[in-house]
Image (cartoon, helix red, strand yellow):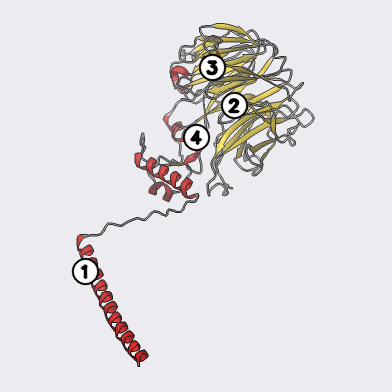
Amino acid sequence: MEEIVFYNGEGTAEDKSGALAIGYGIPIHSQTNVLAYRQCASYPNGAAITGTKPGDRVFAAAKGKALINVYTYGKESPDQKIPIPEQLTCLTLVPNKDENISNLNDYDQEDIEESNDVYTKLPKFRIPYLLVGGGISGKIYTWELASGLLLSVKEAHYQSLTVLKVTSDNSYLVSAGKDSRVLVWRISDLVEFSKDEERVIKPAHVISDHSLEVTDIFINNNTKQDSKLYTVSKDSTIRVYSLYSFELLSTFVITGIIESIAVDSADRAIFVGLQNGNIRQIDLYEPNKATNILEAKGGAGKILTLPEDHELKTTITYHNPSPVKQLALSLDGSLLVSGDASGKVVISDIVSKQVVKELKDLGSPVANIKILTAYQTSEDSNIEKNNKAIPPLKRVITTGELKEQEVVFQKGFEQEQYLFDLEAHLNRVSEEALYFENLSSINSEVITSKKTLGDESNKVKELEQKVAKATKAYTDLRVMYEDLYKEHTELLGQ
């Protein structure tokens, strides 16, 4: 398994055509297969990627233009430049339910039929269900990618949007803007057709606790009851909400203006990028001095003011003084990828707070950083050269007619799903044990095949005959030897 870092920049004012704006896809743990995407300038949080397999795509909302550049994963130049009603400052995707399975599911047909594991063969042409964009005017646009239909346009924020995120179960869309508000939308409301002209789409919840621009948000991937929403703002506060009850759980106050946020996958720590170039780590659990037992910080609406870290025990200072624009954590939470306003992107070790790898410099403020998992298969080298084009995105809201909803798409092969396949698990464990015992994949175990009763009796008779023949030959040979030895003795006596 490999982890791929996709990142791009905002571009520079001198490069009006965007020819020098390049996005990259670079493996974290190796130096091979560096991918580049030209003319990939966007606003912060204005790019999205569907995956790291042939057939996946990269969407980038062109900065300063009412265009979306669409790239095929692995190809440098954009395949399509799709016009849209206005400039989009942020993008996000809502995947199809059938494609929520991990990239592990890219196996050959024969491998699927011979295995009892749960795998799905993804089609070569696959696109997410929805593309949601935040306009520079504060509107939210929702397109159905398979048909290109514009399902809804909602005047959500008073100023331009800064970030859009979707929950892991694809139920809610969370938007934040420069108007210091955070809105939670039901995706079902944004795609529902209604002939009632008086019907108004309203957010499920409105968060207006911040006093300045909301710069970033983060949603964890826990169960619905434990899902949390983290928001950061230029008012130097980090607020944690429950997405189940929309209750404010904790508020952290920090010194400095906050630009970005990333949260450990196990909710053990929060990492925030500051405008002064530092990255602060906020541990969400600390030992009780009396009992030495770990206890959670915050909760119940508490406000915690964090002291300055003068000894730099929980601070990474590599980017100082450039503001840290984007943060992302690796799958195991041991590595932190960060990008600043000067275009530098580095990978830091969480424990030692040291930089372990520097990635290619963008030369402009970093706009997006996303980490995706990639599994190497035989199909990875066969990048599709001629992919089916994405339908043009409409500029007028659809009427909801049934004819407009007819779309043609490829569906992957699905294997019957099991909650737990005991036989496959035992086979996998035995293979792993065999490897560690023999230090190879060669099975030296003797396997006895099962035969019928008639075949076994015939084989026994045949073996008995061979043994009798060998015994008789041995007896004759021994008698001959004794006679020769006796004759030899008599000759020596004479």
Residue 394 location in percent, x, y?
Answer: 55, 29
Q: Which residue is mark 1?
A: 461
Q: Nearer the viewer, residue 351 or 461?
A: 461
Q: Which residue is mark 2?
A: 91
Residues under numbered marks 2 and 1 in contact, where contact means CB atoms less than 8 Å apart: no
Please state which amino acid type lies under the numbered disc 3.
Leu
Tag on residue 146?
Answer: 4
Q: How much space separates mark 3 and mark 2, taking CA atoms?
A: 18 Å
Tag on residue 229?
Answer: 3
Tag on residue 191?
Answer: none
| Mark before the other along the chain sequence, 4 or 2 | 2
Q: Nearer the viewer, residue 370 or 494?
A: 494
Please state which amino acid type lies under the numbered disc 4.
Ala
Image quarter for residue 254?
top right
Q: How much space separates mark 2 and mark 1, taking CA atoms?
A: 79 Å
The nearer-to-camera label among 3 and 2 is 3
Decide if residue 477 is on the left or right side of residue 156. Answer: left
| Mark before the other along the chain sequence, 1 or 4 | 4
